[in-house]
Amino acid sequence: MSYLRPDIRQRADELVSLYPQRRSAMLPLLHLAQEQDGYLTDEGMAEVAELTGTSPAEVRGTASFYDMFHLEPVGKYVVGVCTNIACLLAGGEELLDHASKTLGCSIGGTSADGLFTLEETECLADCDIAPVVQVNHRYVRTTTPDALDALVTDLRNGRRDDEIPPHGTLIRVRRNGGLRAPRAQVAAEREAAQKAREARAAKETK
Amino acid sequence: MTSLLTSTTTDAPMTDALETRTTVTLTVNGREVTATKGEMLISAADRVGTYIPRFCYHPRMEPVGVCRMCLVEVDGPRGATLQPACYIQVGEGMVVNTESEKVKKAQDGVLEFLLANHPLDCPVCDKGGECPLQDQTLAHGSGETRFIEEKRHFPKPIEIGELVLLDRERCIQCSRCTRFASEVAGDAQIDFAGRGDNIEVAPSPTEPFDSIFSGNTVQICPVGALTAKPYRFTARPWDLEQVESTCTTCAVGCRVAVQSSSNRLTRVLGMDSEAVNHGWLCDKGRFAIDSVVGIDEAPLTDSARRITEPMIRRNGALETATWGEALREAARIISSASTPSAVGAIGGAALTNEGAFAWQRFFRGVVGTDSIDAQYGDGLDPVLVAALPRATINEAAEACTVVLLTGDLREELPVLFLRLREGLVKGTTNVVEMSASGSALSSLSRVKLPIRPGEAHLVARAITTDDAPLTTLASHPHGGLFTSADLMEARRLIGEDGSGVVFVVGRPNLAESSAPIEAAIRIFAERFPQAKFLPTLRRGNVNGALDMGLTPNLAPGQQFALTAGRSTLEQLRAASTGEQSVIVSLGGDILENVVDTALATAALTVASLIAVTGHGGPSLAFADVVLPATVMHERLGTVTNIEGRVSLLAPKVTPPGSTWPDVAIASELAEEFGQNLGLSDPEETANVIEATTGYPCGSAMRSTMEGIVVGRIDAQTERRPLDPMAFPGIRSADLVGIAPRAGAIASSDATVAGIATRPTLSNVVGELNPVIPMPDTYSLRLVVDRTIYDNGAAVRGTEALRALVPTSVLRVNPHDLTRIGVTSGGAVRLTSARGSEVIAVVTDVAVPRGCVALRLGTLATTESSDSANVVNWIVDSEQVVVEVRMDSL
Amino acid sequence: MAVLTAPKIVSSRSEYSDSHSMSRYLATDGFTALRKALSMHPEAVAAEVDSASLLGRGGAGFPAGRKWSMLRKAPVSYLVVNGDESEPATFKDHYLVEREPHQLVEGVTIAAYALQVSQAFIYLRGEFALGLERLQQAVNDAYEHGALGSDIFGSGFSLDIIVHPGAGAYICGEETALIEALEGKRGFPRIKPPYFPAAIGLYGQPTVVNNVETMANMPWIVNNGGAAFAALGQGRSAGTRLFALSGRVKNPGVYELEMVKNTFRDIIFDPALGGGIVGDKKIKAFIPGGVSAPWFTPEQLDIPLGQDEVAEQASMLGSGSIVVLDEDSCVVRAAWRITKFFSRESCGQCTPCREGSGWLERIMYRMEHGGGRREDLDLLLDLCDNIAPGLSWPPQQTTICVLGPSIPSSIHSAITNFRDDFIAHVDHNGCPHD
Ligand SMILES: Cc1cc2nc3c(=O)[nH]c(=O)nc-3n(C[C@H](O)[C@H](O)[C@H](O)COP(=O)(O)O)c2cc1C
Ligand code: SF4
Ligand code: FES
């Protein structure tokens, strides 16, 4: 029995078949498992282990290396405020403190209503609109305490939900193309071309 | 120092040519050094006595270069740069400086970084006194700390498995343990979690760390982060005494350091033996030392109980007696038999070669019977084994192709599994697996030719001759199990004459007579004259016992006996009909070792039983006399492993109570018959063996080396210098072991010439075409295989291991289970001609359709069974194959 | 005055709000370069790139053409595009994938054709959710348009591109760590040698790794020729480059400028560019190429924006991101925050970086927040020296990858240039700015 929901599992199977080696699907699969539960459950990781041909210890070891994966439950909205150099110079620390008060949670903590988790992030590569704030990895381009308060009110009232999906949902655009020619055939053609090139090169050097 | 090459190659001119091609010359600290091409700088430096500090490097694993302790200066195109000596291969003309100021500062810096977050709990740490970090700090550390910050904190030791505790604060992230788990053992049950200075070793979120090799991670941990529950706090390293010895838990014969503290066994560590175990051990071999002491409260019928006094049955109960009384009683029982052939002996795998030799001399010479057998009906014909060209473990590990026709090696001969796996993972060895129920090597096997019970010889024939047997195999009601393409691939891998091929042969299924397997082995041996064979007779010193003549048809030194006695199963059958009246049990417990318990029970009920043993066991309920023997780590002797390597078994502790070594028991018993065996002690016995048969026991006993392979002067390997960073806790072996005595024969001078009357294949009798009953569609064929944590003496006598004995569960192909409408995890009723039982069931695709598999020595869960083990009531040794039925409840 | 005459090579569609759409891309010369490339011999395409003297835009600045030719001897198996952009204050690749995703896809396809690779991966930083969606859409569009997949534009050349999301780990920008991540493992950089993933890359196969911006240059180079590209800029620094300007400037943002022709002063102060310091304060220091780079002071404002020009002054142009500190900025706090970043992002594999970064961060924290001691200055420098012996530039290292020797840059720069600020922190027992 699959722990992952059928729709998620189907996407997972697609991903596994996409890569030359199934372990490569690790990070995308973990994103999917996180999309289902908002964080990574032990069961979700065990299924990823099965799908990638690894051990649960390896999956947890890998997942815990990456900041975007949460191994404990988080709020519906994970709010990240950057305090790295460009944001620091633009008041990132102050905005983070303010967010902590507005959301009612400590840095790294989750609000009592389970709606928000607050994180201090490293540079999010949007430094010209600093300090940078992300909600569930969507840039909200909110740089002042007042704007942040307004955003939080919107979130509480579900007014930004079409723009900001629940935590864990990363890519909503599904891959719909793909190499239509069989991989083996492509590889064979490539190899033949390479051989021809080598032969040519060999002739030239002679 | 000679290189590995010169010591194994005898052809001098060729060696020279090879040497120039494969060596390079470099300069280390101004001195010229010759090294093997491809060798890591650190090990080349080791050989010339330039010690470069290190933590993550382990000579038996791939280098990773992560700890950075081994940085040295290497001249390159851009001037001298700091490079990790463990990761840099030697190069021609390379200029290396390991002592410059820059090197010293870098190394001191790394050490200071490692200590920054390391707790200051050395006084209470298990590793204190033998800790590479501590040692290196004493040697290089500055003595004062500049780190005034709060140290990293983790909750103190957490239990990550039944045997191992983890203290994450002490971890220095060298990754030796995680690499061992994934790279060597092949089950990554632990891995790093987290990132940066939060990185920690972590088990799986859902399963405990229960690898059967978990103890190795403890042994190679360079700090006290991983500790073994059984050893924790039992001793301080400076109180430990050590001998080098051989593990006899199974027949791989791993070299070990056995340590004790005030006559109490405390720890077993793996020695770095080039020929055998590369430093690794399985957890059973490592932790089973508790079974030497045993459990005092256990009843006599429990193998956890240690037997320390002679006993005689009086008024129906075993009572303590003096040695004199017990020996007289034993002699009386033996003498009371109508003819010498009404006496027989069973067992001997737990003996030393010297003990086995003495007993066979007693039975053949004093009693006059050839009914002696060190195997329990679950082995192979010793004549066949002796006739096969034997491979060494190294040859198997380096073979181009290995054919597996044996049980799951990870369960049966664990370190052989590790050694074979190495070549498989590297891709230098291909495996053809012929298995009845899959194994830990299945997933790495190039070709899988599954065999149902009774089919081994048919598959062998299909490989060696033509496709015709395929038709027979395919006509099975459930169809064939492999394609002719698989067969072609197997043939291709084995080649025309089998050169470079090693057949690893044993008994993949214990619920089947030995005939089909023995036929298969003979078919292979005849068809592939260049192939070598590694038999997997797996009990402790069974190979030595057979070589010492504890077999019905071979005399010591694998020479043909003139007459042939009864094998174990024949003895039991003869005893149950009254034809044989006396059974002498040597070592292991008969009821615990014979798979067909019903037969053994019938025999013991009728016959008299004299048990020479160190442990209790269910058979003692039938014993008339019990003679207490010394066991491993208490006695001196030699043992022989699967490849025929004779090595030293060294005593470490004084035997308890009135136990005697077997040589003494056999000699004294002979005295009761007015005869002198001429064997006063193990050393004399070893010399007698060597003098009379050429079998190198005497030489092996005087050697602290890795032992001597019978008939194989070329199988000697060189010993690496002990690297205390790689093998913390082991004292240099030169200081311990048996002191070499004047006049001792150097190991290479030993008489290892072939044995003249060694049997050949033509001496092997037995059916080449055993007739197997036709399978029918409704019954299933039983496969019985082994588990490492069986319910035997080593496990039962060791607190830490007892919890690991699995419960019995029937493994079934998903198709067969679906057919009766039961799901995996449910229960079924299993019925054989002998009775029926309810048993838990799981699906297992490695079990062929039409078969079911059970592990021997697992624990029954249902009340209906009074045997500890479900398997035993079901297997009927009269049958070539065992048919069962499976029904839903 | 700034020289702003050069063409926009990678940001030509910046004036359009729908620059990320396929229709806009097709309306603005989209895929013309690919069609042209496919009509050429693959080696000829590679030769154009070689002659363009395009230095890799990921930070190390290795010539793309040279990297490729090193590889063409063995058949290249995979092309991997590095879009992990996590170097603090670097945001040009983010700009490119969100605004010009099709240009990236076209560039990758051209490069794959030149290298004769049929499988490419674009490893994109996981936090770029919008970028991931736009890039996947662009890949889908390209498949539909026949610009990707089998038999591209009927040329017989086939390519598959997988958009692979990262998951939040700076170190995965390091190319060998990226390959590990792409193989589904923890992002532990591989030990060198080999110095390039060339021979043993993804799945142990020969692999080319190039930065997103490097790839984005391909269409222009093919359309206009390598020589036209090389004619821009000066010396080894050819073409234009995206510079990400941030910190205490009036107009932070991404600017595409011809290389070498402008100086740091130009980009920071020109009204058309940075526009000067916020509040017209004085500039105190600036970081010329990402936080791994040693800092510059106002004396170095007139150094041209060129790879070798910056290297000669013992720093690096790196990822092309410039951070400006003004007279009110606390250099101790800035250096502490950068150290904290490295400590959080150290992969943890090798000792000097794992333990050194954490130790340095804690000392710097005390400096800034109270508890700093005068002797800490020597301690800081000595620990830095144990990570990057000699504290020279380019650095030596005791670590596996160059994240290690990047850690000392800010601390060393701050202490050498602003020792008095540190003393003030010690005397004040914390930050005097607070
Ligand atoms: C710690 C570290 C982080 C890096 N991060 C990035 C990055 O985010 N993006 C990038 O393109 N290159 C990054 N690099 C450089 C890559 O290793 C590699 O040199 C580059 O991707 C090659 O592409 P190029 O030749 O096109 O520049 C990083 C290097 C290091 C050591
Ligand atoms: S230098 Fe740092 S990031 Fe690089 S390998 Fe070492 S620990 Fe990892
Ligand atoms: S880096 Fe060489 S021993 Fe650790």
Image (cartoon, rainbow, N blue to C red):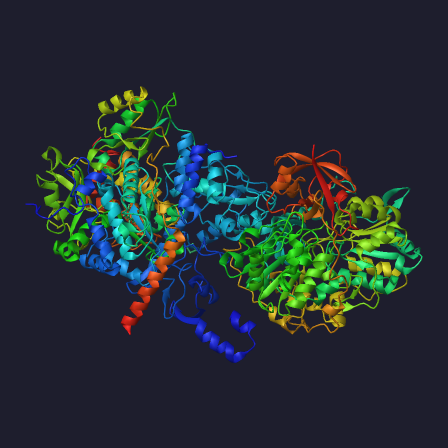
Tell me which residue sits at (27%, 58%) in the image.
Answer: C67
Q: Position of residue A168 (x, y in %)?
A: 37, 32
Left or right of residue B434, residue C172 in this image: left
Q: Position of residue B140 (x, y in %)?
A: 42, 54
- Answer with the quarter of the image where residue B74 lies: bottom left
Q: Which residue occupies the foreground of this view, B131 or B33? A: B33
Ligand 3: give its quadrant. bottom left
Residue, far left:
C1
Q: Which residue occupies the foreground of this view, A144 or B148? A: A144
- Quadrant of the image containing the C terminus of chain B: top right
Q: Position of residue B219 (x, y in %)?
A: 55, 50
Q: Which residue occupies the foreground of this view, C261 or B862? A: B862
Q: Position of residue B433 (x, y in %)?
A: 60, 56
Left or right of residue C323, residue B584 in this image: right
Report whether residue B543 is seen. yes
Left or right of residue B676, residue B541 in this image: left
